[in-house]
């Protein structure tokens, strides 16, 4: 598989491992005013750089996010984004803090953009569930850079589709050929599993127009489906004679067969699902009711009539804020993200958008939940200070309802917790930052020892207040006290209430500041000693 190279790539391919692990610091919770349904809680808006925010999410959400949608800066030269990743390399250090502007002014713009995107995409890939999908909005220029990078991170053959969104409806006359589209790339770690779980798109009235009810059928609108097919792979029971109610006989013409066997035809006939025309003497058709139509298979052409355009997106936001919102980047229309989520989410999916902007993704999640009673959850990250004044404010308004007079939009209900990216777990000198508290440190160590979130123990467990939980093979113990040095010795082992476990673990992983037991003893009893903080894994 061809791969893309750019200046600085070798410095950032492992940068996500070097990003300090920080804790999410909860600022407040918001829930719907009384009277609105609250089926959409447990959501997060995180204020901070998504590189750090995504890393903070790993212990709880690695491999658990069902749908990722991102709309990063496209690197047009007009966004004026700042490259600020703290990559420890002299060449990259020169870029830090610089506004990434017009190509003519700064030829390294594309390298910086790729350096910015790569570690974030790596973390997003880790957060994505195996059968989940990742959707990325991108323009015509950056798609040529993004696709090889995504292919490299996901592996060959993981692109599901490159959807074309018609972003505007009026003609664009400034360029030689007017630019009216963007892409939405879709990737999955397991495209076959994605195909099985993805939803069809509900049909709209335009598509439903062919369903009529000329005979006042009590089961509602229906359409006739022709009954013949090409005879290429037909079996013997697809050639038979059909007699219509008027007595007219029908057989498939030369090279054709009936699309269904005679037995199926008879069943459908007895259920009144074969139509022979108004006078009962036309070629038979199968009746397909509108109420039974599951939807249509999504395709890569997304016209603005179906999913909105950039004008509509601006109007969406103005309606919510009752005028200008102050969001100076182009938002996406809610209908566009609704379409993404209609295809890829189930009612209880977890949805992540790490370039949150004005919060369109959260809006679409809440709207879909309100429509179908689902419990989809969202996590949004936004680094600018408007994370509170625009992103969170929009979501509060969507939850509680907005608009006046005949433009009132009912609240969706729900709630969210607002976080900022907080303190790092390790200090610059590599020691533990004890200010973050023992609970946070325990959670981190349990994650690095591969104890699944649901199997982690709290300090009240039956074995020891220091036990973290069990993996398939080992009991993990984190013997840590903020104010004293801990020593793994016979006394400490004697305090572990191993007999309270259903069976004796094969192995023990025990962290402490010091170890007073000799190697032979540790080996004989299957104990691995890990020194705090030296042996705590940095991921
Ligand atoms: C194109 S906008 C997204 C618009 C969004 N889809 C909407 O409909 O409102 C990109 C957003 O990503 C944010 N952003 C850029 N780099 C970021 C980073 N490193 N961490 C978090 N947010 C970032 C920008 O501040 C901007 O709000």
Image (cartoon, grey):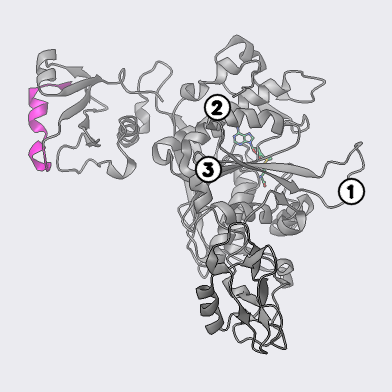
Q: Earlier in the sequence, mark 1 or mark 2?
A: 2
Is 80 placed left or right of 23 in the picture?
right
Q: Position of residue 495 (x, y in %)?
A: 9, 32
Q: Residues within 10 Å of mark 1 (few under 14, many from 20)?
A: few
Residue behind mark 2: 119
Residue appearing at x 64%, y 88% in the figure:
245
Question: Whole-percent x and y of residue 487?
Answer: 16, 21
Point 92% across, 42% down: residue: 173
Measured Cα–Cα span from mark 1 to mark 2: 37 Å
Instruction: Give the quarter of the figure containing the C terminus.
Output: top left
Q: Magenta span has 502?
A: yes
Q: Label 3 vs label 1: CA separation? A: 36 Å
Q: Secondary structure at mark 2?
A: helix
- Viewer-nearest residue: 403 or 18: 18
Magenta residues span 486-503
> Is residue 460 among what the camera can see?
yes
């Amino acid at each position: 598989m061809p791969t893309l190279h750019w200046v600085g790539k070798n410095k950032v391919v492992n940068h996500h491992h070097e990003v300090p692990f920080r804790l999410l610091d909860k600022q407040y919770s918001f829930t719907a005013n009384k009277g609105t349904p609250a089926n959409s809680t447990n959501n997060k808006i995180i204020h901070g750089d998504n590189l750090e925010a995504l890393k903070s999410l790993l212990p709880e959400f690695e491999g658990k996010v069902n749908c990722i949608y991102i709309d990063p800066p496209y690197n047009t030269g007009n966004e004026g984004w700042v490259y600020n990743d703290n990559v420890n390399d002299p060449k990259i250090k020169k870029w830090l803090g610089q506004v990434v502007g017009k190509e003519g002014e700064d030829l390294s713009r594309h390298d910086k953009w790729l350096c910015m995107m790569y570690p974030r995409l790596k973390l997003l890939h880790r957060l994505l569930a195996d059968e989940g999908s990742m959707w990325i909005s991108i323009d015509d220029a950056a798609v040529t850079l993004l696709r090889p990078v995504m292919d490299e991170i996901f592996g060959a053959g993981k692109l599901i589709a490159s959807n074309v969104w018609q972003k505007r409806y009026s003609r664009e006359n400034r360029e030689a050929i007017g630019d009216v589209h963007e892409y939405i790339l879709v990737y999955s770690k397991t495209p076959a599993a994605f195909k099985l779980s993805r939803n069809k798109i509900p049909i709209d009235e335009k598509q439903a127009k062919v369903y009529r009810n000329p005979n006042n059928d009590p089961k509602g609108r229906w359409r006739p489906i022709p009954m013949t097919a090409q005879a290429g792979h037909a079996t013997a029971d697809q050639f038979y004679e059909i007699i219509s109610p008027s007595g007219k006989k029908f057989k498939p013409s030369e090279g054709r067969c009936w699309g269904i066997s005679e037995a199926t035809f008879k069943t459908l006939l007895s259920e009144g699902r074969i139509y022979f025309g108004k006078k009962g003497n036309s070629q038979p058709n199968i009746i397909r009711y509108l109420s039974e139509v599951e939807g249509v298979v999504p395709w890569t052409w997304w016209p603005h009539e179906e999913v909105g355009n950039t004008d509509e997106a601006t109007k969406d936001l103005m309606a919510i804020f009752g005028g200008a919102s102050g969001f100076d980047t182009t938002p996406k229309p809610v209908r566009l993200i609704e379409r993404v989520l209609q295809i890829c989410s189930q009612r209880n999916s977890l949805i992540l958008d790490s370039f949150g902007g004005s919060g369109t993704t959260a809006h679409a999640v809440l709207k879909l939940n309100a429509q179908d009673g689902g419990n989809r959850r969202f996590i949004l990250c936004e680094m600018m200070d408007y994370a509170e004044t625009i992103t969170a404010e929009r979501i509060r308004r969507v939850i509680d309802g907005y608009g006046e007079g005949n433009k009132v939009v009912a609240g969706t209900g729900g709630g969210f917790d607002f976080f900022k990216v907080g303190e790092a777990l390790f200090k610059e000198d590599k020691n533990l930052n004890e200010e973050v508290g023992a609970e946070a440190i325990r959670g981190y160590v349990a994650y690095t020892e591969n104890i699944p979130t649901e199997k982690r123990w709290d300090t009240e467990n039956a074995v020891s207040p220091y036990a973290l939980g069990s993996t398939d093979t080992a009991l993990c113990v984190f013997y840590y006290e903020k104010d004293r040095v801990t020593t793994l010795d016979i006394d400490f082992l004697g305090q572990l209430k191993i007999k309270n476990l259903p069976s004796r673990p094969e192995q023990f992983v025990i962290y402490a500041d010091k170890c007073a037991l000799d190697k032979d003893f540790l080996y004989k009893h299957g104990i691995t000693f890990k020194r705090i903080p030296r042996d705590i894994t940095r991921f």
